[in-house]
Amino acid sequence: MKKISSLIVHSYKWFLALWILIAIIMGYFAIQLPSLLEGDGFRTDGEFEKVKEELNETFDFPESTLLILFETQDTQIITSTLDDIKALDVASSIESPLDNDSQMKDDLAYASVHFTDESLDMNKIIKGIEEITENQEKVTLTGAPVISEDINKASQEDLKRAELIGLPFALLILLLAFGTVVASLLPLIMGGITIVFGFGILAIIGQDTELSIFILNIAPMIGLALSIDFALLFINRYREEMVKQEKAQALMTTIQTAGRSIIFSAVCVFIGLVAMSVIEVDIFRNIAIGGAVVIIGAVFSTLTLLPALLYLLGPNLNKWRLIPTDKDTTPRWRKFARVVMKHPVIIAGTSLVILFIGVIPVNNMTLSIPTINALPESYDSRAAFEVIDETFMSDQESTAYVIADRDGEWLDKEGLEQMKELQEKLSEPEIVDSVNTLYTTSEIEDPEQLEASLQQPEARKRLEPAIDQFIAEDQLMIPVNLTVAANSEEAQDLMTKWSTSDWDVSMQFGGQPKFNQEIYTEIYDKIGYVLAIILISTFIILMIAFRSLFIPLKAILMNIIGLTSTFGILVWIFQGGHFGLNETDIALILPVIVFSLVFGLSMDYEVFLISRIHEFYLQNGDNTKSTIEGLANTSKIITSAALIMIVITGAFAFTGVVPVKQIGIGIAIAIFIDATIIRLLLVPSLMKLLGDWNWWLPFSKQNQKAKSSSKAH
């Protein structure tokens, strides 16, 4: 680190020039990112995707469908609206309520507008149709593509709202920590640079990779919080060193000490993100990519651009003082630390009891894939979709689609007999309402009678539309209507059972029930690997950093308890509908994302605190004294850093997109628990109880050095 720190300090002009160039180039790409984002990221390569593609290409299922809600049965309004949409010449077909009574009920009606050409730009089409529907009273456009587009808009609005709330509070905390305007603005500048860098890189990646719309909120949340935290800790250490030595040497020492801690912390967060990508669902990989990019930006800007700016500013760093911060708060924190050291058993026990109370609601956690409820209720597309769903779709809970493939014709004797057997077997489960095949359409139940009808020209002609609907050469498509919702355990269990059963022909399953089953299965099957990667890697990194077995074990255990307590509190808030929130399930992605991110983020404070304790321990060899001094010297800055992390992520509590709201609140609660109960109470208590065992590592000479320092003192 000495050579690197020397290079950075002595080449500060070159680094300034480089970052100006990076900011200009990345800024150009960054503004393009929102237009490149689409979809919620819930996609995995499996049977669902294969069946969906087969349904689109072979059985002419639409690639996209828009729904139009008419809160009137005025035929003139319906006809003129649909005629204007037909005139756009982009829809492959339109299902009008005037042609189908099932699409009209009471004073409501809806139309389905289908698109089979996947090359179409749906955003332009949506805008074109919106211009038509907005000119008509009681007519609303909705459907999955519209909802996706609205979530994108809501995400952009949420990001602005969160920044307007979080950044002023962050500036206030920085002013309280540093006292001067210049020093307080630097971390915010670092945050801005990190976001521009991150968005620019993501926009380049987004040219060839589909990125989820949720990345627009989660990447800035991570990038802002981390970069501001890193800058805060770096500047604080630099100001400490400036008292002891001249500017250049102070910067080099800061890079070697605080810089080392920042790198270790970033690696811990990075590991959590990389581990998340093991789950082969697009949203996890998207967040892993987005998080990794902003982490890299935060580390490099903090270790290169920030030192360059500090060197350039010189004494001006302390310019425009608004708040007097000359008073040393170390004695107060030292006094607090001594109280903790005197009563370690009581404090540790009380802290654990509080945390375990938070854990209790976890047993009631209900996880679900975010759907229409992810969009704020204020959006017309959500309200319209819910009306259509409740009014017209309630009789049929969900539909699975089966693609059966056999060697030979489906319309010969053997094929028809096999079709009948499949229909009967698929009809056996209690949750199956109906199975649609050529038999149900023709109302002929006997294979021999159906074969005879197919040999008669007139009967064959009548059945031709049904044949085209269900059969394409050697492939048979079978819709299976279920009496349970697609996200129910019963539907998922049925999909698992069918996918693992032995069938006489090749069978593939699709539809919303299969989609849900694949997403849940992928997460549940891979979560063990994610946890193993995070825990083992973190243990090794901390063991190398502090040359200890017990410190990493303790850190991991405390993090697990703190995060489990966080999940319990989230269940109480969201599923319980407290603080004026509507009762809602916990987003399926939340436990994975919050655990992966916070496990690394909370290690920031562990590394910063234990690093200082470790420094003192190597100097004096006294574990208790080192813990007191480490806590006294870092508590103010760790508390400030945690507060910034809390206000930046907690600001997303005021946003509308529910999964993002849950993730933001989850991270804020986890950091609050970590920076207070765990970092200020549990960690020092356990450091006291373990004594010199904190620093034990087989074959390490650390204890011998510490003992020598202790004797010298």
Image (cartoon, rainbow, N blue to C red):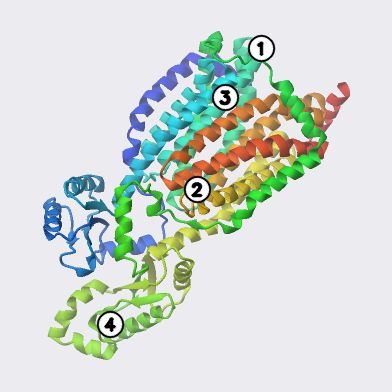
* Quadrant in which the N terminus appears: top right
Identify the residue at horizontal 60%, vertical 28% (top origin). 640
Along the polypeptide, which appears first: circle 1 or circle 4? 1
Look at the image and tell me whether residue 634 can be seen.
yes
Dot 3 corresponds to which residue? 232
Identify the residue at horizontal 45%, vertical 39% (top origin). 654
Instruction: Residue at the far right: name it.
Output: 711
Q: Position of residue 17 (x, y in %)?
A: 43, 17
Along the polypeptide, which appears first: circle 2 or circle 1? 1
Residue 647 is marked as none
Q: Amino acid at mark 3?
A: Leu
**Distance Cα–Cα, label 2 vs label 1:** 45 Å
Along the polypeptide, which appears first: circle 3 or circle 1? 3
Q: Residues within 10 Å of mark 2 (few under 14, many from 20)?
A: some
**Distance Cα–Cα, label 1 vs label 4:** 88 Å
Q: Position of residue 421 (x, y in %)?
A: 36, 83
